[in-house]
Amino acid sequence: MARQSLSASEQGIGKAKQAFRRTELTHEQLAADVGLRTRYSIWKFFKGEPIELYIFKAICSRLELDWEEIAAPKPRDKEYKTSINIDTLVQHLREKARPSVEQRCGTIRVLDMTHPIDLIDIYTNVHLLEQLTGDRRLKITQLLQEFDPELHSFDRIGLSKITEKRILGVDAVKHYPKLMILGKPGSGKTTFLKYIAIKCIAGDLLNNFVPIFITIRDFAEAKNQPSCLEFITKFLSNSSITDNQVTEVIKQGKALILLDGLDEIREENASRITKEIRDFSDQYHTNQFVITCRIAAREYMFETFTEVEVADFNDKQIQTFITKWFQAKESYSAEQFIEQLQSNRPIRELATNPLLLTLLLLEFEDSGNFSTDRAELYKRGITTLLRKWDAKRGIVRDHVYRNLSLPRKKDLLSQIALTTFERKDFFLKKADFGRYIAEFIRNFSDAQTDSEMLQLDSEAVLKSIEAQHGLLVERARDIYSFSHLTFQEYFTARKIVKSSEPQALEKALQGLVSHITDKSWREIFVLTVGMLQPADYLLQLMKQRIDALLAADEKFQQFLMWVSKKSLVVEVSHKSAAVRAFYFNLARDHHPQRAPTRYRDAELIRALDYHLFILLRLGNIKALDVGLDDILALACDRALDLEPTYYPYAFKGAFFLACERALILEPRLGQALQELQEQLPDLNSNERRFKQWWEANGQAWAEQLRAMLMEHRNIGHDWQFSDEQKKLLKQYYDANKLLVDCLNSDCYVSREVRQEIEETLLLPVAEIRNSEFKIV
C-alpha cells in the first residue's frame, strides 16, 4: 500500500516560511531536527510539493504549526486520491513524450535542402547577449570607431561588431526560469529551442522536467481558440498522456515549456495570444519557460521574462557549423569551403547568420565552388530573407506595408542604399531612415498626405523590414543600419543598374566611376559590372578614369614608358600586361628589408597571369629574364639601404645569387659584377672589418652597383617619388587591379573590349593613343 503524502497550500507555505524565519534555522538544521539525512524534503515542503505524511507532520510540529491548517486540500480526482510521487510522474511522462519530441525536434530542414539533417549532428553552440543590441545607448561616432571603410583592410564585420559579453545559450536556460530569446531572422532561434527540447528529453539538461515544444502559430490558429493549458493537454494527448497527468505536472512546476515564434502570429491574433501566454506563465510561474521572437517584434513584452539576444556567429562557430555540415553529409569538402570563404570577405560576412551560411553551403554543394556572379548569390540571400524563408515554413505575415510588393521593397532599399552610401552614412538615426522611407512611399496612390501620418507610416515600414526580413537592424537605441554591409553594397549597385532611362544610366555609371580610387566602393563596382548586360561601357569608363589619374604628370608618364619598354625587351612567354605589372611593382617602391613580403602587391599579376604569379610565389623565376632583374633589384635595394650596424646576411645572399645568375644569363654583366664583388672585404672572416669598410665605402659601392644595373639591364632607376606620388601610384595600381577583377568576374563583356583593356593596361597615355584600340 502506498504511503500517504501531503503538500502545503500556498497560504500554508506563507505561514510556514514566517515560522521558519523565527526559528533562525537553516534547511539542513531543520532536516536534522526532524530526523532527515538531507534537506531535500524540506526544500519540497516549502515549494509546495508532496512529501510523506509523517515528515510533513514532523516539520509542522518543529515549526509549532497545526499541520491540518498548513496542508493543501486533497485532490478529488480518483486517480490522485492516493497521492503519487511527482518525480515518478515526471519520468513517466518523459518516456511517453520522448518519441514525439524526437520526431518533431530531432531534425532540421530549411531552404532547398532535399533531406532533413539530424539536429544534434549539425547543431553549433548558440551564444546570447544579455544586453540587447538595440538597447545600447551609443552614438553614431562610437559605432564608427569599430568600422572604417577608408582603411585598406577595414573590418567589414565591424559594422555589426558587438563587444558585449556572450553567454552560452544552454547556461542561460539553466539560469533564468523565464527566458525570452530574441534574434534576427535566420539567427537560429528555432534550432536552439529544438536543441533544448532534445537535450532535455535525453536527460542531458533539466532531466527532472517534461519538455513541451509548442509552435505558437499552431496555438494561435487552433480551432475554438483554446487556452494554453487546453492546447497543451490536447497536444500531448497524442502521446497517450492524460489531461490530468499534464495538469498535475504543470501545477507542480515540472514542465519546460518551449514556445517558438511569437512573431509569427497574425495581427488579429496577437492580442489574444500574448494575453494567454502572459496569464499562463503567471498562473503556473513555477515552471520553466523559454519563448523565441524576432528582435524587432519586441512590442510583445512580458514583464517577468529575462530578455536575451542571439549573437551572430563568430569565426569559431562558423568553422564548427561548416565542419559538422560536411561530416553529416559524409563529404570531405569542409576545408575547401572554409578556404574559399576566408578568401572572399564580402561572402564571409554573410556567414555570421546561420540561415545565410546554410544558403552558402547549399550553393557550394551544387557547384563545388562559389559562383563568380556574386550579385546573383547576394540576390538569392536577399530573396531568402524577403520571402522564401517564411514561405518554406508556411508563415503568412500581416504586412504593415501591404502595397510594397517584392520589387517595390527592393526599390525602396536600393534608393536608401545608394543615398546613404554616397554620403558614407553607414549608421542612421531612426528619424533619418524614416525620412528616406517617407520620401519613397509618399508617391503611392493611397499614401498619407498629412506629414505626421506619413512619418508614422514610414516608421511602421522601417519596423516591418527589420522584424520580417532582418535587412535593416537596430545597432543601438534608435540607430539603424543594413544588417550586412554586403546588402547595402548590393542594393547600391542595383539602384545604379536599374536607372530607368539610358541617359540616367549613363549618368549613374559616370557617378560610380568617380569613386574609382575609393576602397569602400570596390565591391559595388564588381556587383554593378555583374548586373549590366553588357558591361562594356562601364569597363571602358573605368579604364579611361584610371589612365587619367597619371595622365597630367610627366614623371609618371616617363615611369610608365620605362615599364612598357622594359617589359618588351625581356624574353618571357607570359601576358605582356602581367609583365608590365611585374616591373611596375619592381620599381615603384623599395622595401629591401621585407624580403618575405616582396611580392605583397602581386595580386594584379595573379589576376592577369596565374602561372607567372605561382612562379613568383615559389621563387622559380631565377632562370628567367625577369628573375634576373628581380634578384638584381633586390640586391641593389639591400645594398642602398644597408646600415653598417647590420651584418649583411640578406644582402650577401641576394648579391651572390645575382652574380651567379648573371654569369649564366648575361655574361658581360656577370663579369662586371664579379669585379665589383672583388672590392668587398671577406664577408665571413671578419664582421667588424666589413662594417668599418662599409661605413666608409658602402654608399659609393652601392651606387656603382646601381649604375651597372641601369647600363646593362635598364633597372635600378631612382625615380624619387614623393610620398604623395607614391600614394597616387598605389591608387592607380589598386584601380587597375579592380578593373581586372571586374573583367575576371562573371560579367558579360565583348571580346573586343576585354582585349582592348588588357592590351593597354599600365601603358602611358601616348602609347594608348597610338595603339589600335580606342578607349571611350
Image: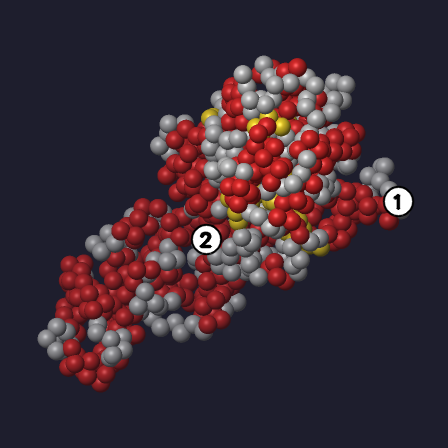
The percent coordinates of residue 260 (x first, y second) are 63, 31
The correct choice, above or below, for 205 with respect to 459 in the image is above
Residue at x-position 68% and y-position 45%: 18
User: How many numbered discs, if any?
Assistant: 2
Name the residue type under label 1: Thr
The correct choice, above or below, for 668 with respect to 87 in the image is below
Q: Give the class, few, some or many, for how many residues have Cα within 10 Å of label 1's Cα (few <14, many ≥20).
A: few
| Nearest to the observer: residue 724 or residue 754 | 724
252 sits to left or right of 123 = right
The percent coordinates of residue 747 (x first, y second) are 52, 40
SS class, disc 2? helix
Inter-mark Cα distance, 1 to 2: 49 Å
Which residue ends up furthest to the right in the rendered image?
A: 450
Residue annotated with mark 2: 737
Return the disc, 1 or 2, that comes first in the chain's sequence: 1
Q: Nearer the viewer, mark 1 or mark 2?
A: 1
The correct choice, above or below, for 290 with respect to 235 in the image is below
Which residue ends up furthest to the bottom in the rendered image?
A: 696
359 sits to left or right of 297 = left
Residue 205's tag is: none
534 sits to left or right of 586 = right
SS class, disc 1? loop
The percent coordinates of residue 735 (x first, y second) are 49, 56
Residue annotated with mark 1: 449
Residue at x-position 77% and y-position 46%: 459
41 sits to left or right of 120 = right
| Nearest to the observer: residue 558 or residue 766 | 558
